[in-house]
Amino acid sequence: MENVAWRTARLRYHSVSHFFRHKFGQPVWKVSVDGGFGCPNVDGTLGQTGCIFCNVASYSPSRRQQVASIADQIREGLRRLQRRHAVDRFLAYFQPATNTYAPLQRLRELWDEALRQPGVVGLIIGTRPDCVPEDVLDLLEEFSRRTWLSVEYGLQTIHDRSLDWLGRGHRYNAFLDAVQRSRRRKLRVGAHVILGLPCETRDDMRATAREVARLGIESVKLHNLYVARDTPLARMFAAGEVALGERDEYVGYVVDFLEELPPECVIDRLSADVPPEYLVAPTWCLDKAAVREAICAELHRRDTWQSRKYVPNSPSN
């Protein structure tokens, strides 16, 4: 077992809470921020229907209740968090839609406004890998010199047939290109991955994990495939065209994935987070604590941990 901080803390994966406490010396929480961005897969640039799973309101509080400004959103987010947790350091997480899909000056203004808010110690920028032209990456690099910053790309999977099924509007090479250009600027890179796609095998998912490891991605958000209302996937599910896996299947996929990752990779999320009023299926993902406990139990049952099967610099890695 690797001699790393999370292992000496007797953890079996590198949790984001452990990482933040180690990095900042105290707990740090994320506050979701909506810059009002669009998406090229919706506005007609690439497509009009978007990804089959995407209902922006299902993961953005601000799309469910309009808030006037970035500052107001952060203040409201802090109030909600501080009712439950004694914390005073936060990361502004530009989460919904495509958060680099705007003119440079608009991006600068929004990110500056977020950093001006009391308690904000960094930025997380979620975006598509095909929406980071050179000037946007230059701006991200500039901000990364001022504050802690992570850019999160929607990978979902390395398999082009699966990306086509999801209606992503890009191929895996777009992610690879974005990562390589981000690396040249020393940007911290995260990836979102969906496990349990009906068009993928267990070996397919392991292959995605090994590629994430090979690229040295700093953090990963794992999601089960879920059906949100008012999406193409919801219509497919209602027509009986899509079957979703059970919780125990997903737990196995997650443990497989963790085993392939390097020990330094931070696990930002283990399962999907969706408000119950937007969820069609599966209902088991509403209880995130139970999913997390099941994953930890499976790690113990297998007597395994993150990086257990990771081989640095392996040709297959």
Image (cartoon, helix red, strand yellow):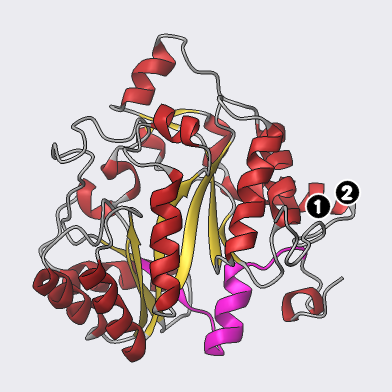
What range is drawn magenta here? 12-31
Horizontally, residue 103 falls left or right of residue 174, namely left
> x, y percentage for residue 177?
40, 58
Reading the image, the residue beneath label 2 is 302
**Where in the figure is residue 310, as x and y percent of width and height?**
77, 60
The residue under label 2 is which amino acid type?
A: Arg
Identify the residue at the far top of this view. Answer: 239
Q: Is residue 42 visible?
A: yes
Residue 191, magenta (yes or no): no
Residue 273 visible at all: no
* Foreground residue among 99 and 131: 131
User: Residue 62, percent across and down?
Assistant: 22, 54
Disc 2 secondary structure class: helix
Q: Amino acid at mark 1?
A: Leu
Cα separation between marks 1 and 2? 5 Å
Q: Is residue 251 above or below residue 124?
A: above
Query: On screen, 299 above or below 234?
Result: below
Q: Nearer the viewer, residue 223 or 293?
A: 223
Image quarter where the N terminus lies is bottom right
Q: Give whichever of 57, 235 is nearer the camera.
A: 235
Classed neighbour count for the residue bearing mark 1: other residues with Cα under 10 Å, few (<14), some (14–19), many (≥20): many
Residue 64 locus on image (x, y percent): 22, 46
The residue sitting at 28% across, 43% down in the picture is 56
Residue on which disc 1 sits: 299
1 and 2 marks in contact (CB < 8 Å)? yes
Q: In the depicted view, which residue is nearer to us: 284 or 182?
A: 182
- Residue at 39%, 16% (x, y): give it: 236
Which quadrant of the figure has residue 246? top right
